[in-house]
DNA sequence: GCCAGGATCGTC
DNA sequence: ACGATCCTGGCA
């Protein structure tokens, strides 16, 4: 059970991301995020996500239109949308749906798998632990050093819990929609 | 240029 | 419950 079992994980293909955002969000649970830093793969298992549904979704950045910040979300699926929040943290999303339909899935928590020594409960903390910042904004997740893949030996089956999203009180009637998904019983969830 | 607000987190 | 800290977007 060494690290060698993770050395041949392949990136999910474009079609995985080119689907309805809620489906992509749920299917991302249990997958692994891989970031190779200085030849060392940092790997975490995705245990919590949130879906952001584009121009209609008042909580979604792209609902205020195309800006320099949201440009990546308007692009093709399978790319990373990374932005700074509160002046001190980054959040990582994966772009979903067809180009021009600006939707994304926020990665909210990871279960450490390999070469991770910091906290990963929460979107800001997991970016620190995975060494993700604005340099990763716009990167294609079908790349050799930064991608999401299926773990070689998927563990036991898990249940998916859905709840309202965190921190989107300003989003009117969208704030209560159950668009946050996490693995039931996981001790690595950002908060209850 | 100015300013309000934010998909967070740690501490009080 | 609050402060840190700075980018973003809207308005002038």
Image: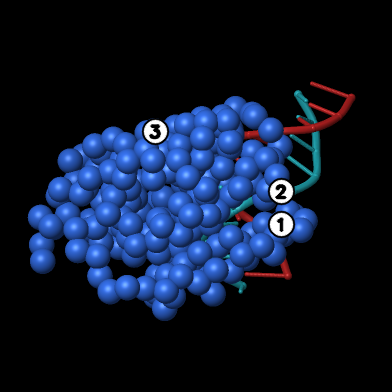
Chain colours: A blue, B cyan, C red
SS for dot 1? helix
Residue in view at x 27 percent, y 54 percent = A150
Q: Report x, y in % for residue B11.
A: 54, 69
Tell me the crowding category of disc 3: few under 14, some 14 to 19, or many 20 or more residues within 10 angstroms, Cα based: some
Give a yes or no on whether discs 2 and 1 share a subunit. Answer: yes
Mark sitting on residue A58: 2
Left or right of A180 on screen, residue A43:
left
Tell me the crowding category of disc 1: few under 14, some 14 to 19, or many 20 or more residues within 10 angstroms, Cα based: some
Answer above or below: position of B10 versus A83.
below
Q: Is residue A138 visible?
A: yes
In this orientation, which residue lies closer to the viewer: A31 or A120? A31
Counting residues from the start of the chain, the first of labels 3 and 1 encountered is: 3
Counting residues from the start of the chain, the first of labels 2 and 1 encountered is: 2
Q: Quadrant of the N terminus of chain A?
A: bottom left
Q: Which residue is mark 3?
A: A139
SS for dot 2? loop
Q: Quadrant of the C terminus of chain A?
A: bottom right
SS for dot 3? loop
Mark 2 and mark 1 residues within 8 Å of each other at the beta carbon: yes
Residue in view at x 63 percent, y 43 percent = A54
Mark 2 and mark 3 residues within 8 Å of each other at the beta carbon: no
Classify residue A4 by image quadrant: bottom left
Q: Report x, y in % for residue A97.
A: 51, 40
In this orientation, which residue lies closer to the viewer: B5 or A75? A75
Answer above or below: position of A128 versus A157.
above
Left or right of A21 on screen, residue A46:
left
Q: Chain of mark 1?
A: A
Mark sitting on residue A129: none
Q: Chain of mark 3?
A: A
Left or right of A149 on screen, residue A94:
right
Q: Which residue is mark 1?
A: A174
| Distance from Cα at disc 2 to Cα at disc 1 | 6 Å
């Amino acid at each position: 059970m060494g690290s060698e079992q993770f050395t041949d994980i392949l990136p999910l293909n474009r079609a995985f991301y080119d689907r309805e955002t809620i489906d992509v969000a749920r299917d991302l649970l249990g997958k692994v995020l891989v970031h190779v830093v200085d030849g060392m793969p940092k790997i975490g298992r995705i245990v919590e996500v949130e879906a952001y549904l584009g121009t209609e979704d008042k909580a979604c950045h792209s609902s205020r239109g195309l800006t320099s910040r949201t440009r990546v979300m308007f692009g093709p699926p399978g790319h990373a949308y990374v932005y700074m929040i509160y002046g001190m943290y980054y959040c990582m999303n994966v772009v979903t749906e067809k180009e021009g339909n600006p939707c994304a899935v926020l990665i909210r928590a990871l279960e450490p798998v390999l070469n991770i020594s910091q906290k990963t409960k929460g979107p800001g903390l997991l970016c620190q632990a995975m060494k993700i910042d604005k340099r990763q904004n716009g990167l294609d997740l079908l790349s050799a050093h930064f991608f999401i893949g299926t773990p070689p030996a998927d563990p036991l089956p898990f249940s998916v819990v859905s709840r309202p999203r965190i921190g989107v009180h300003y989003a009117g009637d969208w704030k209560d929609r159950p668009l946050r998904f996490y693995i039931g019983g996981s001790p690595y969830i950002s908060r209850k």
